[in-house]
Amino acid sequence: MAMDELIKIQPYGLNKEEKRKLYTKYISDLTWKHYNGCPEYKKIIDTLGYSYGTSFLPEDAPMLPVRLFKEYELISTKKDQIVKTMTSSGTSGQQVSKIFLDRNNVEAQTKVLTSIITSYIGKKRLPLLILDSKQVLKDRSMFSARGAGIIGFQTFGRNITYALDEKMNLDLDAINSFFNKYQNETILMFGYTYMIWQYVIQILKERKISFHIEKGILFHIGGWKKLKDKAVDTATYNETIRKTMGNIEIHNYYGMAEQLGSVFVECEYGAMHCSVFSDIIIRKPDDFSVANIGERGLIELQSLIPTSYPGHVLLTEDEGEILGEDDCPCKRMGKYFKIHGRIKGAEIRGCSDTYER
């Protein structure tokens, strides 16, 4: 099945058996594609003892530690075919991952992200308020997964407005004008988890300002470490946003630069969901065997999108647990899960939601 045919499938439209059959073929095919295209990946697969061309079940596919992308430039296509190089965000002094994308991979990412997000908001472009600064798109030193996330989300909006000015200060004139203009429409908002809290919500609270949006949808992404340090959990976060902004439908989502486009969106019942285009396996940290439903372990992410680099099966440094499959109350098919955060002793990730004044 080609990517164009895959995109036609509803993003949460395959049951367990159908998806397992799809991944058994796709993940095997991608593994050998990258084996033939990426010399470094070939060395890894050979060292692991896989026999060339064999098919394997998804849970038996060779996985790469996500940190390898900080150490090596892994490319599965000709360098002159690369049209975009993405970097992960990193704190000062940290190495960043480099992800090399050809035109087909970029188009696939865009189509998949569109399929997933429009399943939540509909296909109509909505007035969009970016809870960030436009400066992130102008300053190349800031442009990484954060900038890519903003650009990617602009696809779903119109009359795009930024809530923060170039100095990361709240632009109340712009916000008021936006809300007044679209008070009778559904408003779409996007931003990074910590930055929304620190530079928007907390400033509004300090100034005792609140809005009364009648219908809004907020998507936010990014690590929770800084918020947990402030004793802010998901319930507190969502409740405070609604008290400050109004009637907001809130969707956190999980993803990483190494698998852009493969996002896992939180449903109305608070669970992260795997779409048709990506999947999750939980690994026991002592022997990397597959954990059972409800058992915590390391998160392995699988994606059907990466074709220009070997990022289709990644072992992350995040901990989580699968809550169930095909039986979430939201009626979406596929696995749904919860993230518990970074594993102890892992490198602190400079998520796209960090900003140092």
Image (spheres, rainbow, N blue to C red):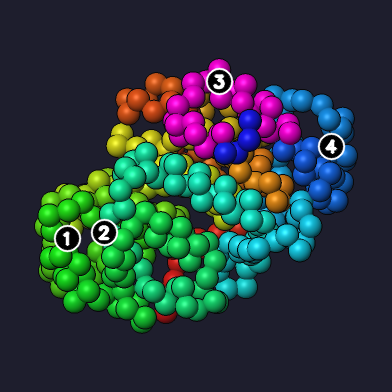
Q: Quadrant of residue 123?
A: top left
How far apart marks 3 and 1 lie (CA) works out to 42 Å
Q: As rendered, which of 349 and 86 lies closer to the eye?
A: 86
Give, as a single range, the part of the protein colored magenta.
5-29
Which residue is found at the position 39% from the left and 28% from the top?
A: 332
How far apart marks 4 and 3 lie (CA) works out to 29 Å
Query: Which residue is labeled 2 in the image?
Result: 127
The answer to whether residue 256 is seen in the rendering is yes
Secondary structure beneath dot 4 equals helix
Image position, residue 253 (x, y; %): 42, 47
Secondary structure beneath dot 1 equals loop
Query: Which residue is labeled 1 in the image?
Result: 182
Task: Return the disc, 4 or 2, that comes first in the chain's sequence.
Answer: 4
Query: Which residue is labeled 4 in the image?
Result: 48
* Disc 2: CA contacts within 10 A as few (<14), some (14-19) or many (>=20): many
Name the kind of residue labelled 4 in the image.
Leu
Query: Which residue is labeled 3 in the image?
Result: 18
Q: Quadrant of the N terminus?
A: top right
Check whether the beta carbons of the residues at disc 4 and disc 3 lie within 8 A of each other: no
Q: Which of marks 4 and 2 is in front?
A: 2
* 8 in magenta: yes
Task: Return the disc, 1 or 2, that comes first in the chain's sequence.
Answer: 2
Q: In this view, does 48 lie above or below 83?
A: above
The number of callouts visible is 4
Q: Nearer the viewer, mark 4 or mark 3?
A: 3
Image position, residue 210 (x, y; %): 13, 63
Question: Is most of the magenta stretch helix, strand or loop?
Answer: helix
